[in-house]
Image: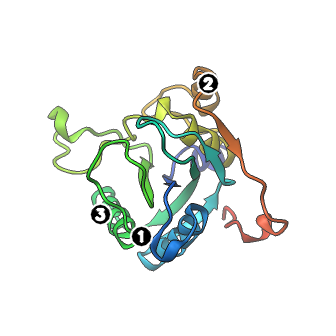
């Protein structure tokens, strides 16, 4: 049992989001679904996916609402290579990085990599690469709600509060609402091994 709980707390977690039409006019949900397939093509296996959520935008006012989800993945890629692969996938779906908090066709964020804690800018010897866990994860209801669905035992690395406590500490705004799921939703979701 301890091994099973440990596996559920750790792992590699990626957030998906979009609030602009993708290439060819795809809806944000369709873009996120296509991004899931693109992950597999990059050697990133999705082993669990949350429901899809409709979320109020944070930052720049006047944007359309986002579609968000969180996935747990398995890959042989290290954190730097994984982040680079996520950025390449974003680029294929038209992501532009010209303004912070801007609306986007696709956003893929590396949230947690097996509980690794690193900040390349803090002189911890990590070198270049992603800050882990994601530096704003604890303040993002649109990430924590779907994360809690697939990893209810997850804790903020290295030994922080669990996801339920993080969610309880946040204000109710910005709003996050679970989208209705298709009848075959459970059949399409990857299952934990």
Cα separation between marks 3 and 2: 31 Å
Cα separation between marks 1 and 3: 15 Å
Q: Secondary structure at mark 3?
A: helix
In the displayed structure, 143 sits above or below 95; it is: above
Cα separation between marks 1 and 2: 34 Å
Relative depth, front residue between 108 and 31? 31
Q: How many marks?
A: 3
| Nearest to N terminus: mark 1 or mark 3 | 3
Q: Which residue is mark 1?
A: 93
In the displayed structure, 155 sits above or below 191; it is: above
Which quarter of the figure has residue 135? top left
Q: Secondary structure at mark 1?
A: loop
Is there a contact, CB below 8 Å, between mark 1 and mark 2?
no
Residue 124 makes an appearance in the image: no
Which quarter of the figure has residue 185? bottom right
- Residue occupying the far right of the picture: 183
Q: Which residue is mark 3?
A: 84
Q: Which residue is mark 2?
A: 165
| Nearest to N terminus: mark 3 or mark 2 | 3
């Amino acid at each position: 049992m301890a091994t099973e709980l440990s596996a559920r707390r750790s792992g590699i977690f990626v957030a998906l989001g979009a609030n602009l039409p993708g290439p060819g006019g795809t809806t944000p949900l369709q873009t996120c679904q296509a991004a899931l397939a693109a992950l597999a093509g990059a050697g990133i296996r999705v082993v669990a996916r949350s429901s899809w959520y409709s979320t109020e935008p944070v930052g720049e006012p006047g944007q359309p609402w986002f579609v968000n989800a969180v996935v747990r993945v398995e890959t042989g890629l290290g954190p730097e290579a994984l982040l680079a692969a996520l950025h390449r996938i974003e680029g294929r779906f038209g992501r532009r990085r010209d303004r912070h908090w801007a609306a986007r066709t696709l956003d893929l964020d590396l949230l947690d990599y097996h509980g690794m804690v690193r900040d390349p800018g803090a002189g911890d010897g990590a070198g270049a690469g992603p800050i882990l866990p994601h530096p704003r994860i604890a303040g993002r209801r649109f990430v924590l709600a779907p994360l809690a669905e697939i990893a209810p035992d997850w804790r903020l690395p290295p030994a922080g509060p669990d996801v339920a406590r993080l969610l309880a500490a946040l204000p109710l705004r910005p709003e996050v609402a679970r989208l209705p799921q298709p009848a075959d939703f459970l059949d399409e979701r990857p299952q934990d091994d």
